[in-house]
Image (cartoon, grey):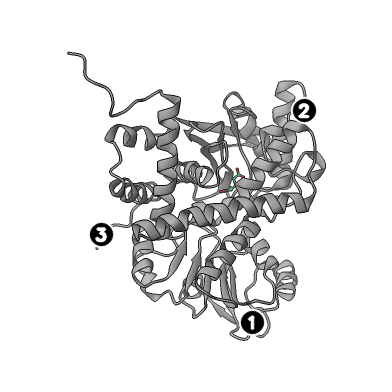
Amino acid sequence: MEKEPSSWEDALRQFDKAAKLIDLDSNIYEILTKPKRIIQVSIPVRMDDCSIKVFEGYRVQFNDLLGPTKGGIRFHPQVSLDEVKALAFWMTWKNTVAGLPYGGAKGGVVVDPKKLSEIELENLSRGFIGAFHDFIGPEKDIPAPDVYTNPEIMAWMMDEFSRYEGHTVFGVVTGKPTEIGGSLGRLEATGRGGLFVLEEAMKRLKMRKAVVAIQGFGNVGESFASLLDRRFKIVALSDSKGGIYNKRGLELRKVKVHKEKTGSVLNFPGAKNITNRELLELKCDVLVPAALEKQITPKNANHVQARIVLELANGPVTTEAREILFKRKILSIPDILANAGGVTVSYFEWVQNKIAYAWKKEEVEEKLKEKMVTAFSDIYDVLEKYKVDMGTAAYIYSIKKMIKVLELRGIYKAGVCKPRM
Ligand code: GLU
């Protein structure tokens, strides 16, 4: 059997597919598929027992043609350069899809933050800024939360950067607490943006109600679940330890209390324990992978029983799996559209920091809705025109936008240059 592609290989595979369909110029292909900058650092951190532990960190700034680079920082034991590169590439196209004035970047530290004390976590977060200080800033590269990073960590990072600068610089990171420059509505923005596009998809498929299964109970999965109203019935939920299923529906409020008490959703009274794999193959209308990459692959894509897959995680469905789902008439709403709500409200946060003003929550939500609905409809048009899966359509849409930017900036007039002999 063929070896499973790495995240980066799979990211390129998806890009290649779209590039072929629009006959992308080979020079432009080269420009768009090479990261502008890869920074690898070692971050020494003083631990509680006074020893020093050195953590490996990365920041990949993939492409800054549209503005400063932007994307989260992930603290996870499985972080690798390959993964961060893929995530930075996806951010580039996500920001383009959402119509934001940003390029794409991503950062990561190889660490299991659950094993760190609060002080160690703070030391690591400040250490990250120490290591990357020269490369980030509100006009250069703007980090944000991602897997296992949160507003508290962003607060420490903003504070540390401000110490280097000698004055407070709110706009250096987004996803901060609202008391110190964070935007209202940022915490649940990824989930809310996902719900806006899901509603659009349901309109197209003439669905009024939906039975939902959600993989992942972190910031994104949990806030998405909390936003669902009576049109939706959640039958399955999971976290990193496993999942629970009840075909009559799960009461979210009670699951949250249970998770708080026991540390996991597992063994929730009245529900059946299932594995994360089993969750993906359940009978439901909407399947929401909201955890990590490569969850739906050619190995299980044929067993997915949903009508819509809402890719709230980054890279949860591989390129080949998207093709299989497409052939089976399952609409997989690609990550670079489905989860773009997070970075969109990050952008609003950055704008508010620039003008030193805080918008009302309703204003943020209204602006978010406008961006998500527009992006969905633009990409759906491409899908209908090219008769391709929505992932490929999203790439065709954003690559075309980027070609225009390249032409206008005029740096690389690929294709129009005549060799001088
Ligand atoms: N980490 C989020 C993402 O993958 C948000 C990035 C941001 O807000 O910059 O889209």
Q: Looking at numbered disc 1 in the image, what kind of residue is underneath it?
A: Gly
CA distance separating discs 3 and 1: 39 Å
Q: Quadrant of the N terminus?
A: bottom left
Q: Is residue 190 visible?
A: yes
Residue hosting label 3: 2
Number of the front mark, 2 or 3: 2
Could you say where residue 25 lies in the image, as x and y percent from the top left? 29, 36
Of residue 65 and residue 218, the one placed in the foreground of this image is 65
Secondary element at image label 2: loop
Nearer to us in this view, 212 or 415: 415
Residue 48 can be seen in this image:
no
Q: Left or right of 111: which side holds 304?
A: left
| Near-viewer residue (129 or 220) | 220
Farthest-out residue, top: 421
Amino acid residing under circle 3: Glu
**Distance between the alpha carbons at the discs numbered 2 and 3:** 52 Å
Q: Upstream in the sequence, badge 2 or badge 3?
A: 3
- 296 relative to 394, above or below: below
Residue receiving disc 1:
249
- Number of residues whose C-alpha sits closer than 10 Å to that of mark 2, classed few (under 14), some (14–19) or many (20 or more): some
Mark 2 sits on what residue? 168
